Image (cartoon, helix red, strand yellow):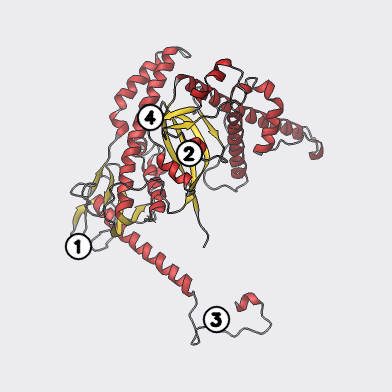
């Protein structure tokens, strides 16, 4: 049996000094410059070839096409880096390689989507990265020295410096610049890397929500969690049904002490809604400032920090919920919601759907259940969980959204709409889980009935000259 590996991101908040922040800013700008250079060269090559085809130039006489591989684009960039980025000696070459690799990946996604080899929505040609609106980030791919990323005090991570910096002050202060302070300990990740149970593939430093953070892309075996649950309660057998919504963030099919209220509801925190007044005030103040001014930059940083605080608070709330679910139950059943349809303009629920972050709730349940041995069952979105009576199984023809109490015309049951849906989702999830187990047993035992001598082949006699595939 082959071992299955997964890749997870382990994120730590950073507290860089002002010189370190300036250096990371220059790295992010160099990455953006390399990314935009690649797109400009590819666009120019495609435009020239298109114009030549329009005037009747044969395919053999066309300008040679530019290779979109990261290796070829990197060689082309190195040939012109003195002209494109004269400051290349003042930054790490990993900054330029990061931009080239990201541009090559974006072009590959565009090509695969154009040729039908990529599932999902159509991917367009990559856009150029703006200096003011793009996310500042830079990635380092240095996998040969895994433990060199961590300082012995486990509260600093290494920042790659230029090999031969021209700035004399940078040379003098290189010892203070090479280690960035982290706000929390990296000891758990260090122990995993040291024991050989996990391996770092990439390190990305980015500015998100007004704060710098580092993300380690870690590859490890399935079933090996990066963090062990703290205060883990006894697991409960069976399947718990979860009905996600907007009035209540989630409703379980039963009451869980310390997690739900007396009816099984989990409150929707509405983090964004509680900060809308402050956000509107910052937006008005930012709109009154002049473009390119220092006051505008200051207000944009304040607004970014507010958005970051909203996102962080929401993420922590969802992590608390998903950790409790995957730690307490053997199986969790959820419904496959059409979030894009819920957030369209006609429904007028876009901001509420985004504030609830139901997609993030499912994403966390998916990867945490895989890591901690919990089974996640996804019920089809067309299953009438809200219209079906959880007591007798009768299905109503129509149920309006503003009807919050389900009343069955067959058995006379009266139950909360969300609780009724959660119980139906739990039953359907248990049924799907049972069917999945029976299919696995049939796959092991064989799909065709056995004969009296335990030979699973067909009852029809196979000729002596039949191919081996028919006999097997």
What mark, if any, has residue 461 been given in the picture? none
Dot placed on the residue nearer the N-terminal end, 4 or 2: 2
User: The residue tagged with tag 1: helix, strand or loop?
Assistant: loop
User: The residue tagged with tag 4: helix, strand or loop?
Assistant: helix
The residue under label 2 is 216
Q: Dot 2, crowdedness within 10 Å: few (<14), some or many (≥20)? A: many
Q: Nearer the viewer, residue 73 or 271?
A: 73
Residue at 73% from the left image edge and 36% from the top image edge: 65
The residue under label 1 is 411
Asked whether disc 4 touches disc 1, contact meaning CB atoms under 8 Å apart, the reply is no
The residue under label 4 is 308
Residue 82 placed where, x, y %?
Answer: 69, 22
Measure the alpha-carbon separation of dots 2 and 3. Answer: 54 Å
Asked whether disc 2 touches disc 3, contact meaning CB atoms under 8 Å apart, the reply is no
Residue 35 placed where, x, y %?
Answer: 60, 30
The residue under label 3 is 458
Would you place residue 142 above or below residue 300 in this image? below
Dot placed on the residue nearer the N-terminal end, 4 or 1: 4
């Amino acid at each position: 049996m082959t071992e299955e590996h997964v890749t997870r991101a382990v994120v730590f908040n950073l507290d860089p000094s002002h010189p370190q922040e300036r250096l990371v800013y220059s790295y992010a700008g160099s990455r953006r410059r390399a990314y935009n250079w690649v797109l400009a060269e590819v666009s120019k090559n495609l435009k020239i070839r298109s114009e030549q085809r329009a005037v009747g130039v044969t395919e053999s006489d066309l300008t040679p096409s530019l290779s979109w591989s990261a290796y070829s684009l990197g060689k082309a960039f190195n040939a012109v880096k003195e002209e494109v980025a004269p400051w290349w000696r003042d930054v790490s070459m990993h900054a330029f390689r990061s931009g080239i690799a990201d541009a090559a990946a974006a072009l590959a996604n565009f090509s695969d989507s154009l040729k039908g080899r990529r599932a999902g929505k159509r991917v367009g040609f990559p856009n150029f990265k703006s200096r003011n609106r793009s996310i500042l980030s830079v990635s380092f791919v240095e996998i040969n020295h895994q433990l060199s990323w961590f300082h012995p005090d486990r509260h600093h991570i290494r920042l790659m410096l230029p090999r031969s910096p021209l700035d004399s002050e940078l040379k003098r202060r290189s010892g203070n610049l090479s280690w960035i302070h982290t706000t929390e300990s990296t000891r758990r990740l260090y122990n995993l890397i040291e024991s050989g149970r996990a391996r770092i593939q990439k390190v990305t430093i980015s500015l998100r929500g007004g704060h710098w953070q580092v993300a380690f892309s870690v590859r490890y075996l399935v079933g090996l969690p990066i963090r062990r649950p703290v205060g883990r309660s006894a697991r409960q057998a069976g399947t718990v049904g979860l009905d996600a919504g907007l009035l209540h963030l989630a409703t379980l099919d039963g009451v869980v002490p310390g997690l739900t209220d007396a009816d099984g509801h989990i409150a929707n925190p509405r983090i964004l809604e509680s900060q809308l007044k402050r956000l509107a005030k910052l937006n008005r103040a930012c709109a009154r400032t002049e473009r390119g001014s220092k006051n505008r930059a200051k207000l944009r940083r304040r607004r970014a920090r507010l958005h970051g605080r909203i996102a962080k608070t929401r993420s922590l709330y969802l992590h608390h919920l998903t950790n409790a679910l995957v730690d307490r139950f053997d199986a969790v059943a959820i419904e496959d919601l059409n979030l894009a349809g819920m957030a369209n303009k006609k429904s007028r629920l876009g901001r509420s759907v985004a504030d609830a972050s139901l997609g993030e709730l499912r994403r966390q349940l998916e990867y945490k259940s895989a890591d901690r041995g919990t089974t996640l069952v996804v019920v089809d979105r067309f299953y009438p969980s809200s219209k079906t009576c959880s007591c007798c199984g009768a299905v109503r023809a129509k149920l309006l959204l503003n009807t919050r109490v389900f009343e069955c015309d067959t058995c006379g049951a009266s139950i909360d709409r969300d609780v009724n849906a959660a119980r139906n989702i739990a039953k359907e999830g248990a049924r799907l889980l049972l069917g999945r187990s029976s299919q696995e047993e049939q796959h092991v035992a064989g799909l065709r009935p056995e004969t009296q001598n335990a030979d699973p082949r067909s009852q029809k006699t196979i000729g002596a000259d039949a191919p081996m595939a028919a006999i097997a």
